[in-house]
């Protein structure tokens, strides 16, 4: 990770783990993504994470993607790559409590492991990865698998593929 990496967390609803736990999990996922994924960001880069409920993410999804439904995660890139580096504002990642919890239960995995996956997934979107085309999806999923494996998390695409949302610039 870049030196002086800043993580800004905003929790907008009850039910999420405590802020300290969310921060520790998020930093763990980001560190693994930077290390295994070879992501490069300017020193002092900032990543904002917003923790909301399904009603709020549904509003954001409708506003930015014209999809009037809740989703697990939305990524909003902060800027383009410049001279091989991203930043200083990496972007925002928004997570929906009920959807993340429901998916973890349906997939019979821990909330923490599913959340770590979604942090990695959202962060990769901020660095230009996407899954619109099959080849892009395979590249992104392979990288997610390697990052998650480095944290001891099983392949989330093995049995029940996760369909996460695409990045949208505000």
Image: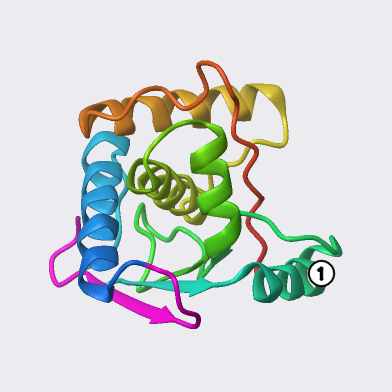
Q: Is residue 74 visible?
A: no
Q: Nearer the viewer, residue 41 or 96?
A: 96
Residue 147 on image: x %, y %: 31, 33
Nearest the eye: 65 or 127: 65
Does 166 appear above or below 75?
Answer: above
Instruction: Considering the whole magenta stretch, tell me its main secondary structure.
Output: loop
- Judge whether residue 16 can be spotted in this image: yes
Quadrant of res 82: bottom left
- Residue occupying image coordinates x 46% and y 48%: 118
Q: Quadrant of residue 155?
A: top left
Whether residue 45 sits left or right of residue 15 in the image: it is: left
Residue drawn at 59 percent across, 71 percent down: 53
Residue labelled with disc 1: 62
Q: Is residue 64 left or right of residue 35?
A: right
- Of all residues, the one furthest to the top in this rendering is 158
Residue 41, image x, y percentages: 30, 59
The residue under the point 67% across, 56% down is: 71
């Amino acid at each position: 990770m870049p030196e002086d990496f800043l993580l800004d967390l905003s929790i907008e609803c009850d039910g999420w783990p405590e802020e300290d736990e969310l921060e520790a999990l998020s930093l763990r996922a980001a560190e693994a993504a930077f290390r295994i994924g070879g992501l490069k960001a300017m020193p002092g880069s900032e990543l904002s994470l917003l923790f909301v409920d399904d009603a709020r993410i549904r509003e954001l999804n409708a506003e930015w993607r014209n999809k009037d439904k809740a989703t697990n995660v939305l990524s909003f890139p902060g800027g383009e790559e410049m001279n091989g580096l991203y930043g200083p504002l990496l972007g925002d990642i928004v997570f929906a409590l009920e959807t993340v919890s429901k998916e973890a239960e349906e997939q019979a995995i821990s909330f923490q492991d599913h959340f770590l996956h979604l942090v990695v997934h959202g962060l990769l979107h901020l660095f230009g990865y996407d899954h619109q085309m099959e080849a892009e999806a395979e590249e992104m999923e392979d990288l997610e698998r390697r990052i998650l494996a480095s944290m001891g998390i099983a392949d989330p695409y093995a049995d029940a593929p996760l369909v996460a949302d695409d990045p949208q610039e505000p």
